[in-house]
Amino acid sequence: MRQLLTWACCIFLIIPLKAQEVPAVYSNIGTDENGIYLQLENKRIYAVPPNDMFHFSDLYSNVTGTQKGLDIDFKFPELNGTLYYGFINYKDGRFPQPVYFRESAPIINGKTNIPIASRLSGRYDMIGWEKSGQGVLGYRIVNKDGTILYDGKVAFTHKDDLFTAVPTLIEGPFINKLTDKELVISFTTSQKIKASIVVNGKTYHDKKASLQHEIKINKLTAKTTYPYTLKIDKLSFNFKFETAPKPGDRKRFTFAYGSDSRAGQGGGERNIFGTNAYIMKRIASLAKAEDAKFVQFTGDLIDGYEVSKERMNLQYANWKHAVEPYWHYIPFYAGFGNHEAYSYLFNDTVSNYSYMIDHFPFADDSGESIFQDNFVLPENGPQSEDGSIYDPNPSIMDFPSYKESVYWYSYDNIAMVVLNSDYFYAPQGLHLASGNLHAFIMDNQLKWLEKTLKQLEKNETIDHIFISLHTPFFPNGGHVKDDMWYSGDNRYRAMVAGKGYIEGIIQRRDQLLDLIVNKSNKTVAALTGDEHNYNMLTINEDMPRYPENYPHDKLKLKRTFYQINNGAAGAPYYAQEKTAWMMNLRNFSTQNALVLIDVDGSSVHVRVKNPDTLELIDAYTLRK
């Protein structure tokens, strides 16, 4: 687990946490006048406050026009550094990004200005704002230590020698929930407005003014390219999308897979506050160049492990910005990993041990709810773990929601089933406070998977099923100590309200494999991450997969299955470790990697490329 992020340029403000009701699924957690506490044998230790120095929205919302340009107040007096800025020409290329001007502006005590009239006019007016009276600027906030904090956008008009900040896109537009007949286009604006999208001569409107927008586009024709125009106040943006083919069309197509893009080493864009934006840009670019119809990206998008909702939202924004120019055209489906953790942190200074549990209230202030706020994903998964045999109070909602972190979708003749192996995650101290184990799939999610696979087996339009979850069934480098192995120790398991699950981690792994391998013929491979490397593991009955003297029933596998691990999207690498199944492992690599899966009717072929060098790392056929 990475250390919680700190800002070297800043002084933290100590703000006590307010008392609130504790979910019944926890044990030894309580509240009093001092806030939320964990009860040890003879003392209480209190949750570390979020220490927020800023509100995420202040990094883009406080812009004032002047006769010279734009003044920006980030409402963050401790911030000193540099602002890089430059125009975004939405008519010059398909993937618009800012082109930074040769000069920058100082940020002093959280304030700065962009001198448009004197610096960005004449031969530097690359967007023609002097004629049109409007434009869009991109800017980059870099603190005094050289860390890139955020890439923002600001739109302006110019009339009667006065610049005025106007509403514009902050994030998006993003293509989501794409089918052969419809999709959802989402985006975020700098101010609350009603926006509209024009597709095929029809205008789709927001129902009410909003900052976050989701507009459904429907009644479309399969396998058709549609230009679309997003209209925001005085500005318009033009892109296009292609609908999916009819289910079971069985024409050749490609999709892409990756995982683990949290901040890497090396400086610069390899760490734009919480994410490796450099490698993610390369991954998105390569996926689009390979004509991938969608990208599945399952877990550890960001550094996470945060106690601050503001910093979590900033990290998610930086990840989305990295792939944004390509997301205008094709869907990016996100999955949940352990670094999506937003937690309460309790530090015992005497024992020098820390405890971490999923933040609550679960409905609107948890790791799961922040993920839901930041992405628009299918909502066909299970509700929660409420109603399971471990639910301490079936009459109320005690658990976090699975909404948008467990789901499935299809494209042509394949189905992608996305699981959440870090739900209700307690990174530390689970034995005392309760919570879920890293890599443990809880009961209701397991039942949902069984039901979903049965439905897909009967679906005549689906030939191939892929299971995507963050944690490997069989780790090979970096997480042999946990994932679904825990160094061969089956005693690890989830705990709810102080009560441990009947099944341990290896038993639960086998229950998953029984559903996926033995009770389904269409499942092809598990697409996993967590370990920061690429490899492919052939899983079959001959592969060793139990510790010595394992006392429980051993699962017999009826056929061969594959685990494709690609956690090589920019997080610091993990080298290969010795395991009992290493003879079944193919082409372990610590290069950055993008998995490209070519589906052509009954055949499934895999290519793996380094998005930075474009080198072919691996290639093989899973189904002929």
Image: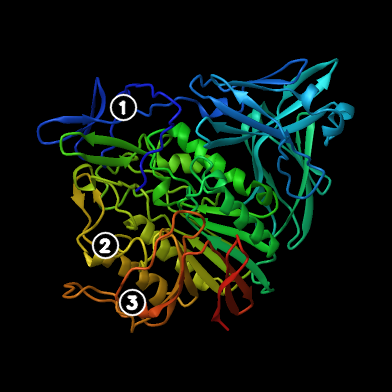
* Residue type of the residue flagged with mark 2: Tyr
Q: Work out whether residue 207 can be spotted.
A: no
Q: Amino acid at mark 1?
A: Gln
Residue 604 at x, y percent in the picture: 58, 77
Residue 290 shown left or right of residue 93 in the figure: left
In the displayed structure, does residue 137 sit left or right of residue 485?
right
Cβ atoms at labels 2 and 1 below 8 Å apart: no
Mark 3 lies on residue:
581
Q: Report the residue at 35% width, 76% height from top.
A: 582
Disc 2 target residue: 486
Look at the numbered disc 3 and give the secondary structure of its residue: loop
Q: Is residue 311 visible?
A: yes
Q: Is residue 36 above or below residue 610?
A: above
Tell me the number on the disc at residue 20: 1
Residue at 37% across, 50% down = 423
> Camera-side residue: 432 or 409?
432
> How crowded is the residue under tag 1: few (<14 C-alpha within 10 Å), some, or many (20+)?
few
- Label 2 vs label 1: CA separation? 35 Å
Give the class, few, some or many, for how many residues have Cα within 10 Å of label 3's Cα (few <14, many ≥20). some
In the image, residue 475 lies at what x, y percent? 36, 66
In the image, what residue occupies the spot 38% across and 29% down? 50
- Residue sitting at the far right: 131
Query: Mark 2: few, some, or many residues within 10 Å (few <14, many ≥20)?
Result: some
Q: CA distance from mark 2 to mark 3?
A: 15 Å
Closer to the N terminus: mark 2 or mark 3?
A: 2
Question: Looking at the rendering, in which quadrant would you find the C terminus?
Answer: bottom right
